[in-house]
Image (spheres, grey):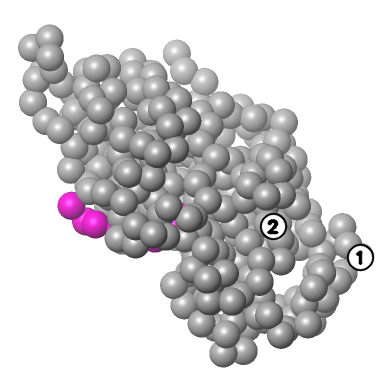
Amino acid sequence: MSRRSRSILGLLLTVAVFATACGDDDSGEGASGPSDSGEELTPITVGILPLAGLAPLYYGVEQGYFADEGLDVSMEIGQGGAELAPAVLNNDYQFSVGEYVSLMQARENNVGLQVISNFTNGADAPDQGINALLVAPDSGIDSVEDLAGKTVAVNGLGGIDDIAIRSILDEHGVDPSSVQFTEIDFPDMNTAVETGEVDVAAQPEPFVTLGERDGLVNLLDPYYETLPGMPLGLFFASEEWLQDNPDLAEAFNRALQRSIDASSDQEAMRETIAANTDIEPDVVEDMALDHWDANIDRDKLETLGQLATRYGVLEEVPNLDELIWTGQ
């Protein structure tokens, strides 16, 4: 099976881009009933994974931002990306979180999904990243050049991590084919580095903070090194549902924008993460937070699509006009 054909829907919402840790299953319930004005709310179900990166969504639902738009939002936790995309296509979920490379792959395979909003970006500066390549302190890996011949653990093969790391290797004159990628779940990656099973772990928060506490070394942020401010997380819906329900989609986007605007209050976001995930409070206080932004950067998406094509993740540069829903 080729890299491009390998479980396209299973790749949807690869949690490496903005996942952090499993949370409390009870966090999936939204408020129900009439709005303050007495009008009945329209039920909307959003497919999620229990991620710290979803703090603005949790917060917006709790603060009533979606109810203010006439929406009764419930969040349902899926067991993985393979469940979320079909649920959106079947209208079990009206919206879901996801990531760009997987949506690009879906569109290339004629899956009728569209991005309705950006959600998270990579770091704009090298010291602001929530992702890292972690290595053992005695590994002898001090630079990108030292990655030649090494084994790198990623959460999913043929996705965003492959693209970013291969791009960095090329930039530093290292043959990307000299590096072996192996798939390991996030919670198991740091141990795999410590035991020598792999040389490098491509980790998000809070596993970056946890790894550094255990003595692992942060080599670099692969997303920043590839493309500062790289578009990562998003919300998507089915193209058919968007055509039939543009008013509801725009209402959802307005409430989501308000929720993301509120993410500038980092204390509120940390409190929301602590309340909706199982991350230990001291880790929540120390970990880097996501870079939330509702604006879709088409120029950077064009660059990301070109990189995905260069490294064989896509066959063609994606048509952004088809990928992105632009409203009524």
- In the depicted structure, whether residue 246 falls above or below residue 20: above
Q: Amino acid at mark 2?
A: Pro
Question: Which portion, as a residue range, is magenta?
Answer: 19-26
Frontmost residue, 197 versus 216:
216
Q: Is residue 208 left or right of residue 161?
A: left
Q: Residue at x 44, y 38 (%)?
A: 266
Counting other residues with Cα less than 10 Å from the Cα at mark 1, is it few (<14), some (14-19), or many (20 or more)? few
- In the depicted structure, whether residue 277 falls above or below residue 200: above
User: Percent position (x, y) of residue 184?
Assistant: 51, 75
Question: Callout 1: helix, strand or loop?
Answer: loop
Frontmost residue, 229 versus 208:
208
Q: Residue at x 69, y 57 (%)?
A: 222
The secondary structure that most of the magenta stretch takes on is loop
**Residue 312, quarter of picture:** bottom right
Name the residue at the top extreme.
Answer: 37
> Label 2: which residue?
222
Q: Amino acid at mark 1?
A: Gly
Tell me the quarter of the image containing the N terminus.
Answer: bottom right
Magenta stretch holds residue 25: yes
How far apart are the two marked residues, 2 and 1, measured between alpha carbons? 16 Å
User: Percent position (x, y) of residue 119?
Assistant: 49, 36
User: Percent position (x, y) of residue 17?
Assistant: 54, 53
- In the depicted structure, whether residue 4 falls above or below residue 55: below
Question: Callout 2: helix, strand or loop?
Answer: helix
Q: Residue at x 22, y 48 (%)?
A: 27
Magenta stretch holds residue 200: no
> Label 1: which residue?
173
Residue 108 seen: no
Frontmost residue, 152 versus 238:
152
Q: Which mark is residue 268?
A: none
Q: Is residue 241 left or right of residue 222?
A: left
User: Percent position (x, y) of residue 114?
Assistant: 48, 34
